[in-house]
Image (spheres, rainbow, N blue to C red):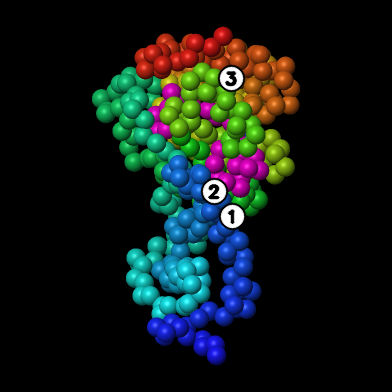
Amino acid sequence: MCSNFNRNGIKKVKESKRSSQHLPFFTFLQNASKSSKVASQGYTPLAFRPFLRLNETMTAEQKTKVALFLDMAGDYLRDGYKRPPREYAFAADLPAVSPLCSDTTPSDAVVITTPRIPASGEPGTTPGKEPGVEGADSLEMVAAAVRCCTGCPLHTTRTMAVPGEGVSHPLVLVIGEGPGADEDASGRPFVGKAGQLLDKMLAAIGLSREQHCFIANVVKCRPPGNRDPLPEEVASCASFLTRQIRLLKPLVILGAGRVSTQTLLNTSEGIGKLRGGFTPYAGIPLLPTYHPSALLRDASLKRPAWEDLKLLRTKLIDLDETYALNTPEGS
Ligand code: URA
């Protein structure tokens, strides 16, 4: 004889119900757990990121429903017995500034505090003010505002906005053009093939995004089909990048590709002419170079790009003692 209850009086979840109702959720869990390598390095598995964003904006009632659902999933995974519902008391609902977003949303950008403290008098520091203290603005506030932004039509086609990420006072601020498909899906900059090449280029001169760089883009939402951002989209996004540069106080800016360099320098000159040397931008040395995607399309650009990277290394040796002591030799 088969009872619907076990000997502790806990109700058994019926096989037919649980398989038909919950299969997509368990597939999701399985996929998420495949990211455990990433999780073990301290990052949030990408598959969970949309849920974390929801967590920032859900009402207490919605949170309770999700928690009860997850409990039921736990029951299923443990032994198939449904336990009595737990009582949850989530914090009061968030103020409904916008149904999906508020400017106070905490950032999940990977912003790591770096030991580099901008020296007084360095571009971006205010005389008489503690270096690094920057009024009320913060990288997290910029990221939150980017995620809420509806300032141009790109917000209607984006999956996730991509505010940028990296260390809070970087040696190098890399500025790309705008998110591609991989970035749009993950909310993180330069994570596709071009991003992997960018990481290798940076590593060749002893830099990493985890320790030395901040990676941002001119526009924070993906232009459909990876087209160039339109002037009005660039204009609409401009204040985010300006705020980021003011807060980050990078020692050097690396302009990755034509679009970012032309935007920053307000010129229509080709990247072939712009690259190969530094131009000041807001008092910060800006080095234009080819976009990693261009290097993937045309291998003959790798040599001049390497020349640019060597210029960058020489500049950093001049500007930062710690980098000078640790930089690889290269050829
Ligand atoms: N290309 C860019 O310019 N930026 C990204 O974030 C990714 C690809």
Does the magenta run of residues contain 46? no
Q: CA distance from mark 1 to mark 2?
A: 7 Å
Up-down: is 204 above or below 190?
A: above
Q: Is mark 1 within 8 Å of ligand 1?
A: no
Residue drawn at x 65%, y 40% as measured from the top left: 180
Element marked by disc 2: loop
Up-down: is 88 above or below 217?
A: below
Mark 1 residue type:
Asn
Q: Residue under label 3, please give it.
A: 288
| Sequence-wise first label, 3 or 1 | 1
**Mark 3 crowdedness (10 Å alpha carbons): few <14, some 14-19, many ≥20:** many
Residue drawn at x 54%, y 48% as measured from the top left: 35
Element marked by disc 1: helix
Element marked by disc 3: strand
Q: Which residues are magenta?
A: 167-189
Residue drawn at x 38%, y 75% as measured from the top left: 86
Q: Residue under label 1, please give it.
A: 31
Residue drawn at x 43%, y 52% as measured from the top left: 105
**Mark 2 crowdedness (10 Å alpha carbons): few <14, some 14-19, many ≥20:** some
